[in-house]
Image (tube, rainbow, N blue to C red):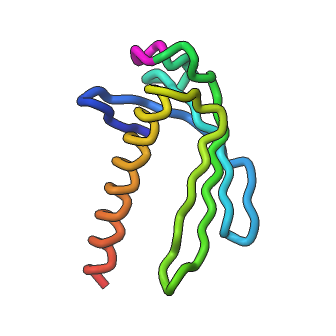
Amino acid sequence: MHAVARGQGLLGNGSLSGGSEATTITFTDSFADERGTLVPATYYGMSADIPLEMVVTVTLQMHEGKTRLALYHDGMPTGRDREDAREGWNESFDKLANLLAGLWKQQ
């Protein structure tokens, strides 16, 4: 996984750990270096309060004919770290929406 935050490339690592009926996806989330080795958030100049590995749970639910996605990022510290993570996830979801819109137009 590769993301860009504030003009800085970030590498991440994780593994799928569970889910049910394709409505819940649970996976680990951590930072990685260029070789894929787990590194602390401080490697990217972030807070030492961010755990080496966190668990993310995504649920998908139908709502008024559309799919509602909810994300819970377990282990994320409060304050600025949480706000930065929220910003990063929102950027990722915007990219996903654009990708899906492009795929939809191709059909």
Residue 45 in the magenta stretch? The answer is yes
Location of residue 101 by image quarter:
bottom left
In the picture, the quarter occupied by the C terminus is bottom left
Location of residue 7 by image quarter:
top left
What residue is drawn where x is 65% and y is 32%? 75
Q: Which residues are magenta?
A: 42-46
On screen, residue 39 above or below 2 = above
Q: How many marks?
A: 0
Q: Position of residue 42 (x, y in %)?
A: 48, 13
Is 69 placed left or right of 80 in the picture?
A: right
What residue is drawn where x is 66% and y is 68%? 23
Give 74 or 79, whichever is nearer the viewer: 79
What residue is drawn where x is 49% and y is 16%? 47
Magenta residues, dominant SS class: helix
Q: Residue furthest front?
A: 79
On screen, residue 83 above or below 60 = above
Q: Position of residue 22 (x, y in %)?
A: 67, 69
Residue 68 in the magenta stretch? The answer is no
Is 61 placed left or right of 97 in the picture?
A: right
Is 67 placed left or right of 59 in the picture?
A: left
